[in-house]
């Protein structure tokens, strides 16, 4: 079979960009991205896409209506497809066995059941969502138990390694593509089919093929190792603050060792995003289920260190402001979990905001890409606050950094947006209450210059 028709279940941060790039690189293949959400599909078909990613708009506009389609007609897309990506969400379970740790596979299972109910011809089903090891087995069991006579399936694991904010670059020039499949002739054939799609733009030597379980575990392992580096440097940032060492200098010094390397050593207020925490919790849960408590404890520590970092930073803000922020105006610059995205899932800014609100502060918030409704949604969520009305009174969203900082007692940099580096801090200082404080949670500002202007400055991993 030569794949001519692809369907992707799930039009989210992964499904949308991934399939847009496939459509752009494989003009002879029809790619249909489907979702249960009518709103999300309408947004993909509109001028304003549901997610912000540099370079995404251009690709979607070039291919939409030609060989790239966004639709709610899941049945038609499954019937037509030779290959189906499952790219649905796999959040942490919020109830029952494994609550707070295990991956909730109800959406993956739902997707598998849909395929089994609808498909009338052979399909290659590709697990793109991040899943626990051996999830492909569960998908296969569902498909086999429900398939139409004569319909057969091959399941592949093809985890996605893109990072938000650089998704298009990552998809265009991935370090590697990983494909896991069954070690049978049919499994190997399916792997070749998926390889041939990626080979439209990725050299074969960058496409790694493994058995299914290695592929599934490698995704969890990659995220765990990346997050571990951040927790490691963040743990050292505390040592730096206590000793007078500078964590940026330490990061450069250790990163020059080619065995360690320079990337992912940026100390911060802690990592956020929808995946690091969820995937490590999932790994911890798997280890516990496999009776490997020492391994589970090892990875749990990466999460615990991240919590410690977020708490430590916010405590420093409160402590510096004479241990009381009640009635004070504090500006948060940035609300997204990193720059170049409008995504706020698990953003450390939410932690900072919640703690300051609990302490009675009023918050002025500005983020270049996060919608006001999203910020209010995050801060009034039942897991964050008891009184949404009180939060709405205390939080104001501003359209730019200057209006957000006007009259504030303190500014907290929560996201490393480039535009925050080049703000006119003299102007900001003039408009703020005195003494004026800046807490640089991302280490992006020129601290000497800010001190010369008159600010009281605190940052991570360096005494000022
Ligand atoms: P998302 O929440 O943005 O999108 C998932 C979409 O799937 C939602 O729009 C939802 O409505 C839809 N959906 C759920 N069940 C469905 C069904 N049965 N049929 C059709 N649509 C359905 O999630 P995401 O951020 O794109 O993540 C998807 C998966 O990819 C997760 O497993 C995640 O861990 C993994 N991942 C995410 C990233 C990232 O940067 N966000 C990177 C790599 C891997
Ligand atoms: C991460 C991985 O980098 C991707 O490879 C993976 O595919 C993805 O998770 C996923 O599975 O969802 P993402 O979360 O989008 O991507 O973004 P990252 O660049 O990894 O940043 C995650 C968090 O760590 C952000 O809050 C960022 O600010 C923080 N970070 C990152 C640091 O604090 N320091 C660093 O040095 C790097």
Image (cartoon, rainbow, N blue to C red):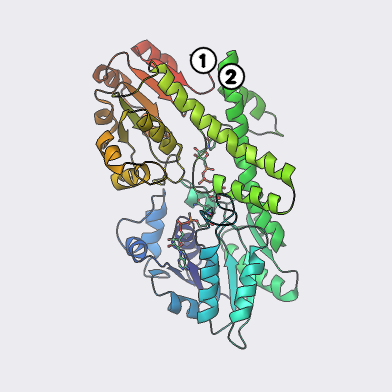
Q: Earlier in the sequence, mark 2 or mark 1?
A: 2
Mark 2 burial class by Cα count in 10 Å: few <14, some 14-19, many 20+? some
Visible in this render: residue 4?
no
Give the numbered dot on residue 240.
2
Q: Nearer the viewer, residue 266 or 216?
A: 216
Mark 1 burial class by Cα count in 10 Å: few <14, some 14-19, many 20+? some
Residue 125 appears in which quarter of the rendering? bottom right
Q: Please state the horizontal and vertical placement of residue 196, each as a whole percent of the image.
A: 61, 68
Mark 1 vs ligand 2: CB below 8 Å:
no
Q: Please state the horizontal and vertical placement of residue 260, each as a whole percent of the image.
A: 68, 33
The residue located at (50%, 58%) in the rendering is 89
Secondary structure at numbered mark 1 = loop
Whether tag 2 and tag 1 are in contact, CB under 8 A, the answer is: yes
Residue where numbered disc 1 is placed? 463
Quadrant the N terminus occupies: bottom right
Q: Please state the horizontal and vertical placement of residue 164, each as a whole percent of the image.
A: 48, 47
Secondary structure at numbered mark 2 = helix
Q: Nearer the viewer, residue 395 or 64?
A: 395
Give the numbered dot on residue 195.
none
Q: Does 211 sit above or below residue 350?
A: below
Residue 314 appears in which quarter of the rendering? top left
Q: Please state the horizontal and vertical placement of residue 443, each as a whole percent of the image.
A: 47, 26
Horizontal side of 330 relative to 257 (left or right) equals: left
Visible in this render: residue 179?
yes
Question: Which residue is farthest bottom?
Answer: 149
Horizontal side of 230 relative to 62 (left or right) equals: right
Q: CA distance from mark 2 to mark 1?
A: 8 Å
Q: Does 15 sit above or below residue 406?
A: below
Residue 363 appears in which quarter of the rendering? top left
Number of marks in picture = 2
């Amino acid at each position: 079979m030569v794949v001519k028709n692809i369907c992707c279940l799930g039009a989210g941060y992964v499904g949308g960009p991934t399939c847009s790039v496939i459509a752009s690189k494989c003009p002879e293949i029809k790619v249909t991205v489907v979702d249960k959400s009518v709103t999300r599909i309408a947004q993909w078909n509109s001028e304003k896409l549901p997610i912000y990613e540099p370079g995404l708009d251009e690709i979607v506009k070039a291919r939409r209506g030609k060989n790239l389609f966004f639709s709610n007609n899941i049945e038609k897309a499954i019937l037509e497809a030779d290959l189906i990506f499952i790219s649905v969400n796999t959040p942490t379970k919020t109830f029952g066995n494994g609550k707070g740790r295990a991956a909730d596979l109800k959406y993956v299972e739902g997707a598998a059941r849909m395929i089994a109910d609808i498909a009338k011809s052979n399909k290659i089903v590709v697990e793109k969502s991040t899943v626990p090891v051996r999830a492909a087995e569960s998908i296969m069991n569902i498909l086999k138990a429900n398939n139409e006579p004569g319909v057969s399936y091959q399941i592949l694991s093809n985890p996605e390694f893109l990072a938000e904010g650089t998704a298009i670059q990552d998809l265009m020039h991935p370090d590697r593509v990983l494909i896991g499949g069954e070690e049978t002739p049919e499994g190997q054939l399916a792997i070749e089919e998926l390889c041939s799609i990626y080979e439209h733009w990725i050299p074969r030597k960058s496409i790694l093929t493994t058995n299914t379980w290695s592929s599934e575990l490698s995704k969890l392992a990659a995220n765990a190792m990346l997050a571990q580096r951040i927790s490691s440097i963040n743990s050292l940032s505390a040592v730096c603050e206590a000793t007078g060492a500078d964590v940026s200098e330490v990061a450069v010094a250790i990163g020059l060792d080619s065995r360690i390397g320079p990337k992912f050593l940026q100390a911060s207020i802690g990592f956020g995003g929808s995946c690091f925490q969820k995937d490590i919790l999932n790994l911890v849960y798997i280890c516990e289920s496999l009776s490997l408590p020492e391994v589970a404890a090892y990875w749990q520590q990466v999460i615990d260190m991240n919590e410690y970092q977020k708490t430590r930073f916010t405590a420093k803000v409160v402590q510096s402001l004479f241990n009381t922020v009640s009635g004070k105006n504090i500006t948060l610059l940035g609300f997204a979990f990193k720059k170049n995205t409008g995504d706020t899932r698990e953003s450390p800014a939410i932690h900072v905001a919640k703690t300051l609100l609990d302490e009675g502060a009023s918050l002025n918030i500005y983020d270049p890409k996060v919608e006001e409704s999203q910020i209010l949604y995050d801060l009034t969520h039942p897991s964050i606050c008891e009184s949404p009305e009180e939060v709405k009174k205390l939080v104001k969203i501003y359209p730019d950094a200057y209006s957000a900082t006007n009259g504030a007692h303190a500014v907290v940099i929560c996201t490393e947006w480039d535009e925050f580096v080049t703000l006119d801090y003299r102007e900001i200082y003039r408009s703020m209450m005195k003494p004026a404080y800046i807490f640089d949670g991302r280490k992006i500002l020129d601290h000497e210059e800010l001190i010369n202007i008159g600010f009281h400055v605190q940052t991570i991993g360096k005494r000022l």
